[in-house]
Image: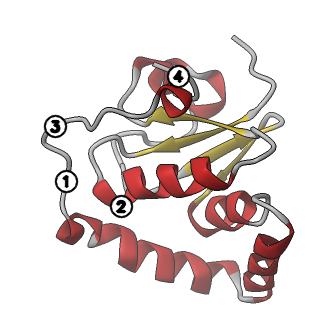
Amino acid sequence: MEYDRSIIFIDGDCLVCSSFVKFIHRRDKENRFLFSALQSDFASQHPCLKEHDLSNLDTVILLEEGQTYTKSDAVIRVISKLGILWRVFRVFYILPPKFRDAMYDSFAVNRYLFGSKKYCDLPSPELERKFIQ
């Protein structure tokens, strides 16, 4: 199934990832993004994600116009599209990708220190419509 918007795949059990989704949703005035959990059937069956190890939940994956972006590239691309003020995040592209991704990895590995979701919080109807599966 084709979608006309970018899709952000996140760890569905992570509180930080859940907060990231809510952050994006509140600022996505142009309705650019949809969301899906990396653990979903949709993610495991999506042809563009076949090359990614979906058992590794330590990354966010952005699917945009047939291209996949991971880790810091995904986060910077998403945030910089949330409006004119958020475009300043593009400045992080000046850092070497290995450095950016090392910082991303060190945070991602420890993200459960902030907690995990034992129960799904009920999203607003508007946010729920943006989730695939």
Q: Which quadrant of the view contains residue 91?
A: bottom right
Q: CA distance from mark 4 to mark 2?
A: 19 Å
Other-residue count near label 4 (Cα within 10 Å), few / some / many at <14 / 14–19 / ≥20: some
Instruction: Kindly identify the residue that appears in the image at 70 percent across and 49 percent down.
Output: 28
Q: Which mark is residue 132?
A: 4
Give the image location of residue 29, x and y in percent. 76, 47
Q: Is residue 14 above or below residue 108?
A: above
Q: Amino acid at mark 1?
A: Ser
Q: Residue furthest left?
A: 118
Asked if the residue under mark 2 is in contact with the one under mark 1, i.e. CB atoms within 8 Å, the reply is: no
Q: Which quadrant of the view contains residue 72?
A: bottom right
Other-residue count near label 1 (Cα within 10 Å), few / some / many at <14 / 14–19 / ≥20: some
Instruction: Kindly identify the residue that appears in the image at 49 percent across and 27 percent down.
Output: 43
Q: Amino acid at mark 4?
A: Ile
Q: Is residue 78 above or below residue 32?
A: below
Give the image location of residue 25, x and y in percent. 59, 47
Instruction: Kindly identify the residue that appears in the image at 48 percent across and 27 percent down.
Output: 128
- Choose between 48 and 90: the one closer to the eye: 90
Q: CA distance from mark 4 to mark 1?
A: 21 Å
Q: CA distance from mark 3 to mark 2?
A: 14 Å
Q: Amino acid at mark 2?
A: Val
**Disc 4, SS:** loop
Give the image location of residue 11, x and y in percent. 37, 46
Residue at the disc numbered 2: 16
